[in-house]
């Protein structure tokens, strides 16, 4: 795929996502791979939507190796978990929700190699980790939060091969990196921030195979790479 066609596809996807977020109930779309480099408008191979699905303004997702889909419902303080291949108006196989979870407005999510779920909570100003298979009104197995953590409005999260936790914070304008054992009111081991980074309101974060950190910036309207 050429750079021109990639940028065109990106603009198209951005428009679709912007339109989707304008509705109270949003369809979760799984796109098929393009038939060719010129195909930029493929139909979804399946959708998850409707009253039974409980999908309400989904803001973040994570997919397990077996295809299990974890969906953060931005305005319902719940995380819905769908079985691999779920299609249509189908209820999730389990839901993480309730006072014990501490969820306020879950956004980005990530899974580690053991299947534990990490959640960046934008209004809760924290990162929560739930045990693999967690369901119902359950407490997280650890929470990173507090003044020392520097977390203000975490939106994106990813977990490195060594267990390090990378958190994009749109209000703090940084990417905080926490050690694998970080828990409670602890400072990050390092932080990517400052004028030279170009970060304004980082929203999503990911890792490349070479270890480079890739950040999408909501306000700066670009994707940047960092080491």
Image: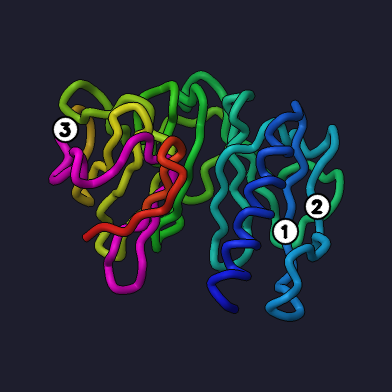
- The answer to which of marks 2 and 3 sits earlier in the sequence is 2
Q: Residue at x 71, y 47 (%)?
A: 16
Q: Position of residue 127 (x, y in %)?
A: 36, 35
Would you name the residue on which mark 3 appears? 186
Q: In the rendered view, tell whether residue 35 sits above or below residue 104.
A: below
Would you name the residue on which mark 2 appears? 47
Q: Secondary structure at mark 2?
A: strand
Please tell me in which quadrant of the rendered image residue 160 appears: bottom left
Please tell me in which quadrant of the rendered image residue 12 appears: bottom right
> How far apart are labels 3 and 1 at the CA level?
37 Å
Would you name the residue on which mark 1 appears? 30
Q: Residue at x 60, y 58 (%)?
A: 10
Q: Which residues are magenta?
A: 186-214
> How far apart are labels 2 and 3 at the CA level?
40 Å
Q: Secondary structure at mark 1?
A: strand
Residue 117 visible in the picture:
no
């Amino acid at each position: 795929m050429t750079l021109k066609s990639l940028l065109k596809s990106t603009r198209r996807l951005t428009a679709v996502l912007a339109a989707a977020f304008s509705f109270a109930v949003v369809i979760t779309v799984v796109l098929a791979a393009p038939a060719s480099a010129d195909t930029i408008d493929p139909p979804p191979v399946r959708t998850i939507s409707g009253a039974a699905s409980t999908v309400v303004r989904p803001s973040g997702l994570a997919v397990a190796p077996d295809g299990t889909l974890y969906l953060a419902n931005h305005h319902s303080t719940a995380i819905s978990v769908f079985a691999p291949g779920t299609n249509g108006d189908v209820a999730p196989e389990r839901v993480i929700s309730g006072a014990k979870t501490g969820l306020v407005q879950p956004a980005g999510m990530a899974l580690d190699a053991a299947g534990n779920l990490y959640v960046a909570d934008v209004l809760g100003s924290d990162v929560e980790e739930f045990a693999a298979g967690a369901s119902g009104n359950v407490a997280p197995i650890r929470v990173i939060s507090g003044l020392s953590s520097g977390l203000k409005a975490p939106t994106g999260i990813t977990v490195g091969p060594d267990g390090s936790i990378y958190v994009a914070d749109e209000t703090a304008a940084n990417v905080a990196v926490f050690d694998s054992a970080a828990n409670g009111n602890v400072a990050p081991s390092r932080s990517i921030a400052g004028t030279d980074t170009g970060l304004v309101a980082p929203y999503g974060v990911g890792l490349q195979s070479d270890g480079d950190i890739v950040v999408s910036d909501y306000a700066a309207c670009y994707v940047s790479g960092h080491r």
